[in-house]
Image (spheres, rainbow, N blue to C red):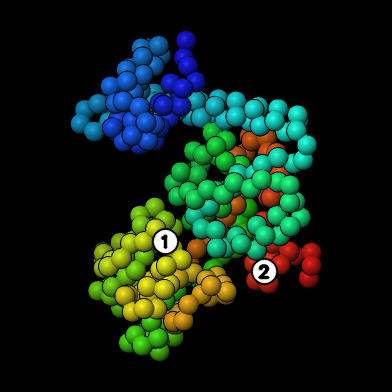
Amino acid sequence: MMELNSLRQFLVVARLEHLSRAADELHVAQPSLSRTITRLESELGAPLFDRSGRLRLNDAGRLFRDHVERSLGELEAGRRAVAAATSEGLGTVRLASETFLTLTGPLAAYKRAHPSVEIELQWSPAEDMARRLRSQDVDLCVASQPIHAEGLESVRLFDEAVGVGTPLDHPLAGRASVSIDELAGQPFVTARKGHWIRRLLDRLFAARGLTPKIVCESDEHSAIADLISAGLGIGLVPGFARRSATRTPGTWIAVDSPDCRRTVTLCWGADSHLSAAARLMRTTITGWDWTTGEPRERR
């Protein structure tokens, strides 16, 4: 009989497609994890991974993964439903996003209106969001790039241009716009792979057969603007950041490309039974006016 822990371990191996990294994440010995996967395959009567060279999830493995995600998600939803039914208040809402600077306004408004709700914020790359929503690891996700996956519902929050931030004394600082070709060879300060702004940078350059010259990758995204202002390089900066109270001195130049944009979207599982706290959070975020920085009903 399959154990829940074995199924959870399988999902980590399926996501990483690497036994030793999965063992490290799970804090278990690799031989033990390998035996768990072999035992699952024996119970199912089919291999879940191709083992010629690098470990790869096969068709049977992908099919099984989808069912396991949904099953564990339903168990988690049941646990949360019981907790909500036996406790006072609205409970907890779990929100994953690629950036929380954008969400500061609606999150603050939500907390003021519902102070008893516990809000769990988790950073997540867009590529993990569909899996996390299907497994009900989180309730809602805010992505700054499209998520193409079945079983999700979404609402577009806003669409905006992404420009180039430069130091005040940079040779490009006086320009109204700049092309991607003109940015080739310029030193870029950006985020690590997986973050939406890095994916956009790589995609814009790859479309022209170019590779960006990256001089700094940072997990501290709030530090990127400071490093640009300090003269370490230039970087992509969303239009929203120009209106933020935390923005640092520098110039913002439009990029002469229709693809240099981001579309911010709120997503949730189509079959998820959202808690009252999550439904209220969804209403707060979708009802936010991103231009004025206030709920729409206040206008």
Q: Secondary structure at mark 1?
A: loop
Q: How many marks?
A: 2
Specify whether residue 244 is in view: yes
**Residue 191 in picture, x, y percent from top left:** 38, 61
Q: Amino acid at mark 1?
A: Glu
The quadrant where residue 90 appears? top right
User: On residue 293, which mark appears?
Assistant: 2
Q: Secondary structure at mark 2?
A: loop
Give the class, few, some or many, for how many residues have Cα within 10 Å of label 2's Cα (few <14, many ≥20): few
Identify which residue is drawn at 37% across, 31% down: 27
Identify which residue is drawn at 75% across, 65% down: 296
Identify which residue is drawn at 53% across, 72% down: 246
In this picture, residue 281 sits left or right of residue 16? right
The quadrant where residue 189 appears? bottom left
**Residue 13 in picture, x, y percent from top left:** 36, 30
Q: Quadrant of the C terminus?
A: bottom right
Identify which residue is drawn at 30% across, 78% down: 182
Q: Amino acid at mark 2?
A: Gly
201 above or below 31?
A: below
In this picture, residue 115 sits left or right of residue 233? right
233 or 158, which is in the foreground?
A: 233
**Residue 176 in picture, x, y percent from top left:** 44, 85
The residue tagged 1 is 220
139 or 65, which is in the foreground?
A: 139
Which of discs 2 and 1 lies nearer the camera? The answer is 1
User: On residue 177, which mark appears?
Assistant: none
291 above or below 20?
A: below
**Residue 286 in picture, x, y percent from top left:** 68, 56
Specify whether residue 56 is in view: no
